[in-house]
Amino acid sequence: MTRTIACVVGARPNFVKMGPILKGLALADPGLRAVLVHTGQHYDEVMSDLFFQQLGLPKPDVHLEVGSGTQGQQTAKILSRYEEWLVGASPRPLATLVVGDVNSTVGCGLASVKLGIPVIHVEAGLRSFDRSMPEEINRLVTDSFAELLLVSEPSGMDNLRREGHSEASMRAVGNVMIDVLKTELPLARELQQPAKLGLKPGSYALWTMHRPSNVDEPGVLAEMAAAMIRIAHRLPVVFPSHPRTKGRLEAAGLWTKLESAPGVHVGPPLGYMEFLSLSSQARIIVTDSGGLQEESTVLGIPCLTLRENTERPVTVSLGTSTLVGRDTKLLMKMVDDVLGGRYKQGRAPDDWDGRAGERIGREVVAFLKDRS
Ligand code: UD1
């Protein structure tokens, strides 16, 4: 009988992480078949399909086509559709592997554990200690039932210990997103994405935001847009917008204002390669993304993080990130510091070395062997 493991992806950051995980699994046990499940949380060409193409991911074996919805609707749909698939799956997967902190992570995890199929969580233990974030709830819930907790940075191990998880259940494996970055960086640079916008490498800021805390309150959103325009007086700002952010900006009448602001380059979301081409050659990154805090740390580029807290504290303590929250005055000061050569130099944790996928593969295979 074929032995299978179900590997779940749903949203953009999941797609990036899954490639090295699949490779690591195949390397550790060529007889184990990974069944790739796409929940359909992200579905647009640029939010999903392009990532599959560029990162050489196999076509999903299963597509749950859940689409968008409120937190509850989306998570419930993911849970029920994944449960339905698991119940009929033949052979029954030995485990479900989920990554990150999105609704697909918790939805599929919960369906799986309730059917007695163990859950493996990649990027376990991260905590922002901010329960107003949907992702923090997803992290806490997923780690509470996952049997194997694979951790990307030291704080994750500390958090899991404090929450009473056993040493046997947790493993430090490094950061799998960095595997992809290290592999793809040379090709991404060759794309010369800055030149396509008429920009020189090292001469522009790259801005991304999509968190509800920054884009859902009209007052905050207006302040963010004003700060972007102010920064563009100092250096050009490239702003590939997430669809939810674009929607909010349009509703507030701010989208056309940004489009016509001198030095602001607004545009649609970009593929992984185009985005890495831009991020790796930026002077400054301004973002509320979790993954980008980590990537900028490895790239050695100052990252001004539009968050009051972070579940990735190593990017602040060791790396290049500074939390500026929604304080646009502080943001402007930090931009001055960067341009004036007064910004800190960071470095990346030692095990963000491009080999996390291999370690994950080995840990998963050992876990499955112990259980059989
Ligand atoms: C989700 C994750 C977030 C992650 C982000 C990366 C959760 C709770 N949040 O947030 O942690 O950082 O993905 O992008 O899982 N939309 C489209 N096309 C798409 C997908 C979404 O237009 O392909 C629009 C829809 O209007 C949708 C909105 O974006 O309602 C939000 O999408 P959703 O997946 O709910 O959350 P994200 O904000 O993308």
Image (cartoon, grey):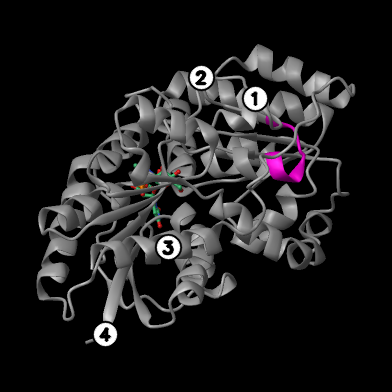
**Which amino acid, by three-letter code, is at mark 4?**
Thr
Distance from label 1 to label 2 (Cα)? 15 Å
Query: Which residue is identified by label 2?
Result: 308
The part of the chain drawn in magenta is 297-303
N-terminal of the pair, mark 4 or mark 1, is: 4
Q: Residue at x 17, y 74 (%)?
A: 92
Q: Nearer the viewer, mark 3 or mark 2?
A: 2
Please, what secondary structure does the residue beneath circle 3 have? loop
Q: Residue at x 74, y 32 (%)?
A: 302
Crowding near pointer 1: few (<14 within 10 Å), some, many (20+)? few
Residue 40 visible in rendering: no
Distance from label 4 to label 1 (Cα)? 45 Å
Query: Which residue is identified by label 3?
Result: 44
Distance from label 3 to label 1 (Cα)? 36 Å
Query: Which residue is identified by label 4?
Result: 2
Distance from label 3 to label 2 (Cα)? 30 Å
Q: Is residue 176 magenta?
A: no
**Which amino acid, by three-letter code, is at mark 1?**
Ser
Q: Quadrant of residue 136?
A: top left
N-terminal of the pair, mark 3 or mark 1, is: 3
Query: Which residue is identified by label 1?
Result: 317
Instruction: Give the left or right position of residue 148, taking residue 82 as reference.
Output: right
Pinpoint residue 103: horizontal percent, then vertical percent: 30, 47
Q: Nearer the viewer, mark 4 or mark 1?
A: 4
N-terminal of the pair, mark 1 or mark 2, is: 2
Instruction: Give the left or right position of residue 277, taking residue 221 as reference.
Output: right
N-terminal of the pair, mark 3 or mark 2, is: 3
Residue 206 visible in rendering: yes
Q: Is mark 3 within 8 Å of ligand 1?
A: yes
Q: Residue at x 54, y 64 (%)?
A: 358
**Which amino acid, by three-letter code, is at mark 3?**
Asp
